[in-house]
Image (cartoon, rainbow, N blue to C red):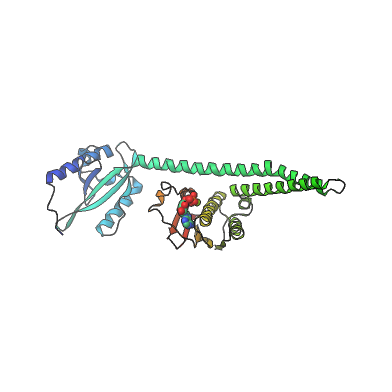
Amino acid sequence: MIKPKFELPEQSYKYLFENANDAMWVQDMKGNIVAANKACEKLTGYTRKELIGTNVEKLLSKEFLDLAREVRRRLLGGESLNQPYEQQLIRKDGVARIMKMVTSLLIIGEEVKNFQHIARDVTEEKQLQENIRLYSQLCIKAQERERGRIALELHDDVAQPLLLLSQRLDMITTRPRTKLSQPFKEKVEELHILANEAIGRLRRCAQDLRPRILDDLGLTAALEWMADDLIKNQGIDARVEVVGTGQNLPDEVQLMLFRIVQEALGNARRHAEASSVWITMEFGDGKVILTVKDNGKGFELPERVGDLASTGKLGLAGMQERAQLIGGQLRLQSEQGKGTTVIVETPI
Ligand SMILES: Nc1ncnc2c1ncn2[C@@H]1O[C@H](COP(=O)(O)OP(=O)(O)O)[C@@H](O)[C@H]1O
Ligand SMILES: [Mg+2]
């Protein structure tokens, strides 16, 4: 391969350094700043005169000093480092800002002379992301509350009167003293059957919105109930296994885990063409790991979990949001022809 012979003249490098939009500075091995560009002034609130000679630790918040030392140690030791990384800066006015940073060694001859940094203020971006996350989690909570309310109303205000209606219709035809003509009796019996069907549908609807079994008997029973439904009504072999001693999970955690499994099973039923699913709940030290695995056709995952919503995979995105809501993490594994596994790990 022919190496391009083009090299920027030193003047151009200086220009780039000086006018870059990102803050750039160089510090010596003791952490004293020896060079800084214009954007550093904007980032830190200090003039360059003030910055030169200042130890960089003065600009970092105390909790983040260890991180800075760790970065230097890793670079000097030739260890891997995830870059860019996040660091916290305290501006001259005392306000904390979050920076996304890249750090590298400046080697002159054979010797490590300095550390050089490129930093970008991402405080607003982070805040915006955090707001969006909080908002979507509030939406989930509101949606769950609303579902609970509708389920209760369906049960109390609609199913109960229908139940009464069904009982009355039944009484008309079965009471021995009432003399009914055969055609009339048949009509009333028909109405009785219709009323019972409506009650059945209503119950299923309310169960989907908010299964009573979850509130009454807890997550394990609810998982078994869902597996049973798959076996009986969908012809899919479903198994539930609980490993370790099941601790009492908080209601919200149970509900979110239930929703994740509900969505995963819905996907296995609707998209996977699976013949079997396995649901496993493992209690470990300080955490619970819930896995839903199917033997279906699998699918192509987006590169990043963050891309689920933007690629229209709202069910999967909702699972991730729910996992985050309870401080957990969602992992997806899928390969075409090899099935799909949804794993959610939550601290307890
Ligand atoms: N278990 C699965 N097996 C096969 N394909 C799946 C599975 N889960 C999800 N998918 C694929 O990912 C897509 C997005 O899923 P999801 O976000 O739940 O949305 P929806 O179920 O509304 O389509 C599905 O349309 C399907 O193509
Ligand atoms: Mg879905």
Q: How many marks?
A: 0
Left or right: residue 171 versus residue 224 is right
Residue furthest front in the image: 183
Camera-side residue of 161 and 83 = 161
Where on the picture, by quarter, is residue 228? bottom right
Q: Residue at x 66, y 44 (%)?
A: 155
- Residue 218 place in picture, x, y as percent: 60, 54
Residue 319 at least partly seen: no
Where on the picture, by quarter, is residue 88? top left
Residue 208 at least partly seen: yes
Q: Residue at x 31, y 43 (%)?
A: 89
Residue furthest right in the image: 177
Left or right: residue 209 versus residue 289 is right
**Quadrant where the image shows the N terminus:** bottom left
Q: Residue at x 59, y 60 (%)?
A: 231
Camera-side residue of 172 and 251 = 172
Camera-side residue of 216 and 271 = 271
- Residue 261 place in picture, x, y as percent: 53, 55
- Residue 173 place in picture, x, y as percent: 81, 48
- Residue 146 place in picture, x, y as percent: 57, 41
